[in-house]
Each structure stands twice: as C-alpha cells, then as structure tokens.
C-alpha cells in the first residue's frame, strides 16, 4: 500500500485517497477561438511524464481536502507540495 502524505492529516493509507491525475494547464479562456485540434489536445492529451510530475489528490475518506503532490512515476515516491489547489476545472 502506498503511504500518501496529506498536508493536513499526515501520512495515511492510499485507500483513503482519490488521485485526479496530473495538474493541467489552465483552461483556455476562449475555446471558440481555438482550432478543433488545439481544443482536442487540451481536453485529451496528457504529458505522461516519466519522472516527477504534479498530481491532484483528494483525501476523500479523511479531511476532504484537495491538494497537490509531486509523484515520481518511476519510483512512486510522493512529495508533499502546496495544500492549496487553484484551478480544479
Ligand atoms: Zn487529510
């Protein structure tokens, strides 16, 4: 089981959390002005990073907070970062 460091509760079992995937770039302010290909890229394509990347996590069976963790996709090492999540979209 992966120990997940909640910035509010400390290290808790992975089963208490939901991972919502990598932190996305901000939503385009005017999607109507984008080409279909550019919009599809924003909606569908993800970086699929090898190494460290930022992910959004929800402590669903705990404090209910959203926060961002840095996770190494090779080693699964989790590093706490900013407890505030700006744009959940
Ligand atoms: Zn928590």
Image (cartoon, rainbow, N blue to C red):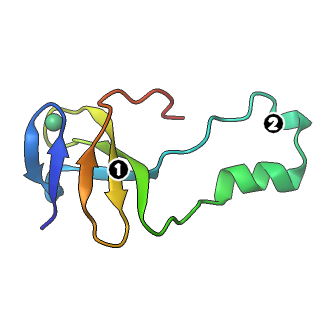
* Residue 31, disc: 2
List x then y, in percent, for residue 54: 42, 49
Q: Is mark 1 on a helix, strand or loop?
A: strand
- Alpha carbon of mark 1 to alpha carbon of mark 2: how far? 29 Å
Q: Which residue position is annotated with label 1?
A: 70
Image height check: is 12 above or below 52?
above
List x then y, in percent, for residue 9: 9, 35
Front of the two marks 1 and 2:
1
Image height check: is 69 above or below 76?
above
* Residue 35, disc: none
> Residue sitting at 70 percent across and 50 percent down?
42
Image height check: is 68 above or below 2?
above
List x then y, in percent, for residue 18: 29, 51
Q: In this view, does 9 lie to the left or right of 18?
A: left
Quadrant of the rendered image holding ligand 1: top left
Q: Is mark 2 on a helix, strand or loop?
A: helix
Nearest the eye: 57 or 60:
57
List x then y, in percent, for residue 83: 29, 30
Quick one: label 2, few (<14), some, or many (20+) residues within 10 Å? few
The C terminus sits in image quarter = top right
Mark 1 or mark 2, earlier in chain: 2
Nearest the eye: 83 or 40:
83
The N terminus sits in image quarter = bottom left
Q: Is residue 38 left or right of residue 53?
A: right
Q: Quadrant of residue 33?
A: top right
> Residue sitting at 62 percent across and 35 percent down?
26
């Amino acid at each position: 089981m992966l120990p997940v460091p909640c910035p509010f509760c400390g290290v808790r079992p992975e089963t208490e959390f939901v991972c919502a995937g990598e932190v996305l770039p901000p939503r385009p302010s005017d999607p109507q002005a984008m080409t279909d290909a550019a919009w599809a890229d924003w909606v569908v394509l993800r970086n699929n990073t090898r190494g460290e990347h930022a992910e959004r996590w929800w402590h669903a069976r705990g404090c209910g907070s959203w926060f961002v963790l840095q996770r190494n996709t090779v080693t699964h090492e989790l590093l706490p970062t900013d407890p505030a999540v700006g744009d959940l979209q």
